[in-house]
C-alpha cells in the first residue's frame, strides 16, 4: 500500500488527537484526585514524629520556612536540623529561631556523612540516625509547612503504604520566569504525579517524605536510598520491591518562589529531566508528548489546511483551558500571564527532553556529577554539600 499525503495528514491528526485526549484525561484524573482524602488513615493516632530538615545556605524565604517548622499544630514532634558546613550562613538565623521557641524540642547536627554522590542525602543521614521516633519526615528546607502539615502527611497513610510524599507546588511568583516555574511544577509535573498515583503508579518525591522508620530500616535504612543518585527514585524502587505503595498527600504543599531567572529554571528542569531519564527511562521517553506546543505545531505543518489549523487552535485552547481549570480547582497560583508561561514552558520541553538524552552530567549546588550509574555518580568537581 502506497502512503499518500492525505493518509500522512490523517495519521498526524490522529496522533495529535490521541495526545490531546491523553493529556486532558490526565488533567481530569488529577483534578478528581487532588483534595480527595479517600480511605481512612491507618496511621496510629497521636504517634510522635521526628522531622528532619537538611539546610544549606540562605534563600529568599528561609526565615518563613524555618519558622513554620516551629509552628506545627501537633502535640508530639521533634525537629532535627542538619547542616553540613559549620560556617553555613543559615546557622545564625536557625539558632535565633530555636532560641525563640524553647518549648519545641529541636536539635542541630553539624557535618554530613558522605555515603554517595547525593549531597542532600549525605546531609540527612546523621539526622535520620538521631531521630528518636518511629515515624520520620524528611522535609526540604524550602517547603512551606502548613500548621497541619504532619496531620496531612499522616492522613495519606494506608495499610499498604510504604511512603507518603508531597510534590512541590510553586507559589508567590514575583516575576515572569517564576511563573514559568509554576507552569512546570503545578499543572504539568504535579498533575502527572497525581494522575499516576491515582492509576496505581505512585512515584516518590523528595520534597516531603513520611517514613515508618522500622520499615525503611528493614530494607537497609536510609543508606539504601543511595542506590540511585536521586533519593526519590531509589525510594520508589525500594517501596515497590517491598510490595508497598507510594501515596501522595491529598493537597500538596507549597514552595514560595519569589524571583527566578531563565538560567535557574532551565538548569533545574534539565537536572530533573536527566535524573528521570537515568532512573526511569521507559517512563521518561513519552515526556516528549506532554506539552501542547510541539504536537500542535508539527501537526499543523504536516496537514497545512485552514480547517486543521482551526481545529488545532481549538485543541490548544481546550488543553490550556483545562490546565487553568486544574489550577483553579486545586487553589494554585493563577494569573493572565500564566497562559504565556504555559507556552514558554512547552517551547522549552523538547529542548529539555533532548538535553536529557544527550548528556549524563548534572550540576547540583556546585557539585558536577555523572549520573549514568551509581558508581559513576560521585562528584566530578568540588563544591559545598547541598540541602
Image (spheres, grey):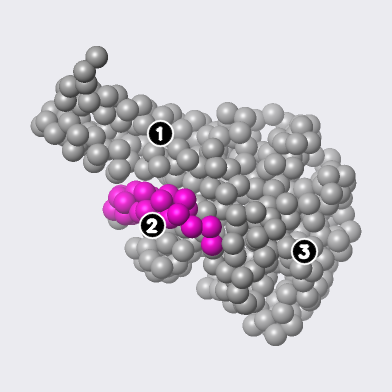
Of labels 1 and 2, earlier in sequence is 1
Residue that numbered label 1 is attached to: 23
Marks 1 and 2 sit apart, C-alpha to C-alpha, by 19 Å
What residue is drawn where x is 73% and y is 75%? 84
Marks 3 and 1 sit apart, C-alpha to C-alpha, by 39 Å
What residue is drawn where x is 46% and y is 33%? 26
x and y, in percent, of residue 274 in the image: 52, 54
Q: Residues within 10 Å of mark 1 (few under 14, many from 20)?
A: many
| Nearer to us: label 3 or label 1 | 3
Which quarter of the rendering shows the N terminus? Answer: top left
Residue that numbered label 3 is attached to: 115
Q: Is residue 272 visible in the rendered structure shown here? A: no
Q: Element at badge 1? A: helix
Q: Main secondary structure of the magenta part?
A: helix
Q: Quadrant of residue 250?
A: top right
x and y, in percent, of residue 103 in the image: 82, 69
Q: Element at badge 3? A: loop
Q: Residues within 10 Å of mark 2 (few under 14, many from 20)?
A: many
Residue that numbered label 2 is attached to: 180
Give the left or right position of residue 42, taking residue 181 as reference.
right
x and y, in percent, of residue 302 in the image: 19, 34
Q: Element at badge 2? A: helix
Q: How many marks?
A: 3
In the displayed structure, 3 sits above or below 136; it is: above
Residue 251 sits inside the magenta stretch: no
| Nearer to us: label 2 or label 3 | 3
Of labels 2 and 3, earlier in sequence is 3
Q: Residue furthest top?
A: 1
Q: Is residue 306 visible in the rendered structure shown here? A: yes
Q: Which residues are magenta?
A: 339-361
Amino acid at each position: 500500500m502506497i502512503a499518500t499525503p492525505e493518509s500522512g495528514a490523517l495519521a498526524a491528526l490522529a496522533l495529535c488527537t490521541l495526545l490531546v485526549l491523553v493529556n486532558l484525561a490526565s488533567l481530569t484524573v488529577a483534578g478528581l484526585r487532588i483534595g480527595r482524602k479517600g480511605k481512612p488513615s491507618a496511621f496510629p493516632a497521636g504517634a510522635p514524629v521526628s522531622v528532619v530538615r537538611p539546610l544549606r545556605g540562605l534563600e529568599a524565604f528561609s526565615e518563613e520556612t524555618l519558622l513554620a517548622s516551629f509552628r506545627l499544630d501537633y502535640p508530639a514532634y521533634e525537629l532535627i536540623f542538619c547542616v553540613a558546613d559549620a560556617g553555613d550562613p543559615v546557622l545564625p538565623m536557625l539558632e535565633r529561631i530555636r532560641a525563640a521557641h524553647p518549648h519545641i524540642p529541636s536539635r542541630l547536627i553539624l557535618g554530613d556523612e558522605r555515603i554517595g554522590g547525593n549531597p542532600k542525602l549525605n546531609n540527612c543521614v546523621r539526622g535520620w540516625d538521631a531521630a528518636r521516633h518511629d515515624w520520620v519526615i524528611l522535609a526540604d528546607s524550602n517547603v512551606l509547612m502548613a500548621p497541619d502539615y504532619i496531620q496531612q502527611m499522616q492522613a495519606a497513610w494506608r495499610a499498604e503504604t510504604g511512603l507518603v510524599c508531597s510534590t512541590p507546588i510553586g507559589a508567590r511568583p514575583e516575576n515572569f520566569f517564576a511563573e514559568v516555574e509554576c507552569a512546570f511544577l503545578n499543572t504539568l509535573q504535579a498533575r502527572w504525579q497525581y494522575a499516576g498515583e491515582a492509576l496505581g503508579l505512585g512515584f516518590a518525591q523528595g520534597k516531603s517524605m513520611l517514613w515508618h522508620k522500622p520499615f525503611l530500616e528493614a530494607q537497609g535504612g536510609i543508606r539504601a536510598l543511595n542506590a540511585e543518585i536521586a533519593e526519590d527514585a531509589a525510594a520508589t524502587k525500594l517501596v515497590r520491591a517491598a510490595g508497598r505503595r507510594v501515596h501522595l498527600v491529598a493537597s500538596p504543599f507549597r514552595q514560595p518562589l519569589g524571583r527566578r531567572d531563565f538560567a535557574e529554571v532551565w538548569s533545574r528542569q534539565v537536572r530533573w529531566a536527566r535524573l528521570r531519564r537515568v532512573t526511569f527511562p521507559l517512563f521518561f521517553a513519552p515526556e516528549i508528548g506532554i506539552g501542547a506546543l510541539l504536537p500542535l505545531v508539527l501537526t499543523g505543518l504536516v496537514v497545512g489546511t485552514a480547517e486543521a489549523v482551526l481545529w488545532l487552535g481549538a485543541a490548544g485552547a481546550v488543553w490550556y483551558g483545562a490546565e487553568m481549570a486544574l489550577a483553579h480547582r486545586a487553589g494554585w497560583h493563577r494569573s493572565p500571564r500564566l497562559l504565556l508561561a504555559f507556552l514558554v514552558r512547552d517551547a522549552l520541553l523538547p529542548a529539555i527532553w533532548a538535553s536529557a538524552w544527550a548528556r549524563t552530567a548534572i550540576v547540583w549546588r556546585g557539585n558536577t556529577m555523572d549520573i549514568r550509574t551509581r558508581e559513576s555518580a560521585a562528584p566530578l568537581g568540588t563544591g559545598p554539600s547541598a540541602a
